[in-house]
Amino acid sequence: MTGGLGEIWFVGAGPGAVDLITVRGRELITRAGAILYAGSLVNPDHLAFAPPGCVVADSSAMTLEAMIAWLLEQAQRCEIVVRLQTGDPSLYGALAEMVRPLRLAGATVSVVPGVPSFAAAAAAAVETLTLPETTQTVILTRVEGRTPVPEGERLRDLAAHGASLCLYLSITLWPTIRRELAAAGWPDDAPAVVVYKASWPGEERILRGSLAEMPELCRQAGATGQGMILLGPALGACRGVGTPRSRLYDPDFGHGFRKA
Ligand code: SAH
């Protein structure tokens, strides 16, 4: 323990399935003296790997101040304190507002990355987000709900690139999404994929349809919470849409690991 305080680890739990956490993350759980987990999103089955006597709390009803106080209190008595978050901690995880006060209080903070839900959604649907000569860019964003989105990051501006779009926290905001995409010139019959609860055993749902169909498909599936929206010209490539040929594996294309 440095300065009498244990280390506080922000661990990405991955999208849901308990075997989609990193080996490092799992190992920290097995050694943790205390775990604060985001109960609204993290699969509680991860907690079965905590050692006997580990103190566990659900943060879903706590304020930021209560979470900071809890983590610091636990760090005074144990060497490893884990803050278990969904997906990867660098994405929509309120990381800065937690790490700053912890560091100010003298705690050592480290982060273990996790499988982000956009990647889990693409995997579940067997979709690639980059496709040669179609798009080489992926935009991770959200539309404005209760949290504002900075000027210059409006969906209509981002969608104008024609790149792959992964929309977090937006599954109930279809009117905004369709309005913004229309303003960027996207037709209402453009394809969309929604993956609800990607990787959660027995709960994952994959919905495919046009932008126009999606609100009703989501409603019918009860997909109102943990859903990822995938959009863009690469969708469907693994199902035979477009020409998926990468130069990386082209016989005429030499590189560091293979002669042309
Ligand atoms: N840090 C997380 C995101 C947290 S914000 C990450 O890296 O993925 C919560 C949002 O993430 C949800 O609104 C949803 O859009 C998305 N999400 C989280 N888990 C998901 C899952 N299993 N399937 C689909 N989307 C998910």
Image: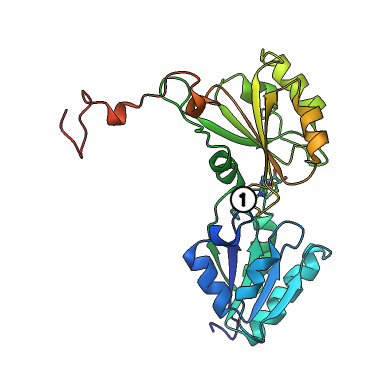
Which quadrant holds residue 68?
A: bottom right
With respect to residue 121, does 143 lie above or below? above
Q: Residue at x 58, y 73 (%)?
A: 29
Q: Is residue 155 visible?
A: yes
Residue 122: which quarter of the image? top right
Q: Is residue 106 visible?
A: no
Q: From the viewer's perspective, is residue 37 above or below residue 174?
A: below
Q: Where is residue 130 shown, x and y percent of the image?
A: 47, 30
Query: Could you tell me which quadrant the C terminus lies in?
Result: top left
Instruction: Give the structural element (helix, strand or loop) at label 1.
Output: loop
Q: Report the side of 74 relative to 29 (left or right).
A: right
In the image, taking residue 16 as reference, residue 144 lies left or right, namely right
- In the rendering, at what x and y percent does residue 139 appear? 57, 33
Residue of label 1: 199
Q: Please tell me which residue lies in front, 105 or 166.
A: 166
Q: How is the image coloured?
A: rainbow
How many other residues sit within 10 Å of disc 1, few (<14), some (14-19) or many (≥20)? many
